[in-house]
Amino acid sequence: MKKVVILLIVSSLTLIAFDGEKVYKQCAMCHGKKAEKVAVKSSPILNILSEEELSMKLSKLVDGSSNISSQYLGMHKSKLKGVNKEDIPEMSKYILNLK
């Protein structure tokens, strides 16, 4: 019985695993399929940032502490809805691997 419960728990965790590709599809409209574009004439090219820089920028967007204009902050927050702090390292790696 214990093995069945453990198997169910592990199976359910893989079902709710973070999907960087799904999330990034919403970003690609402005940032490019390979994160190679400057969006809105002001954002950095994402795929040339260090993993640390990108993670920090994503964290600030997710928690709302970014210093970008409120119009763009709201847009980013809605696109990143469902992304939490624990997902950010994986999201950063996904973006940097698009090159």
Image: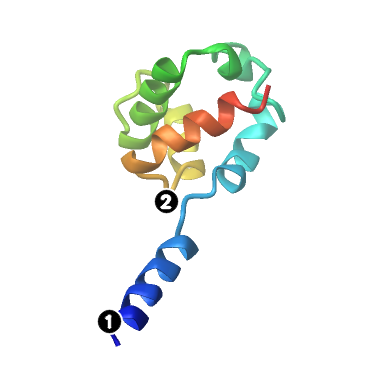
Foreground of the two, 8 or 28:
8
Instruction: Locate residue 6 relative to residue 92 in the image: left or right.
Output: left
In what quadrant of the picture does the C terminus appear? top right
76 lies left or right of 48: left
Instruction: Kindly indicate the quadrant of the structure image that contains residue 43.
Output: top right
Query: Which residue occupies 51% across, 42% down?
Result: 79
* Labelled disc at residue 38: none
Q: In which quarter of the image is the N terminus?
A: bottom left
Tell me the residue at 44%/47% (across/down): 81
The image's mark for residue 2 is: 1
Left or right: 38 in relation to 6: right
Asked whether 61 or 14 is in front, the reply is 14
Mark 2 vs mark 1: give the one in front: 1
- Mark 2 element type: loop
Image position of 55 with respect to 78: above or below: above
Q: Which colour scheme is used?
A: rainbow
* Residue 31 figure quarter: top right
User: Which label number is shown at residue 82?
Assistant: 2
Q: Where is residue 55 in the image (x, y as percent from the top left)?
A: 40, 25
- Label 1: which secondary element: helix
Residue type highlighted by circle 1: Lys
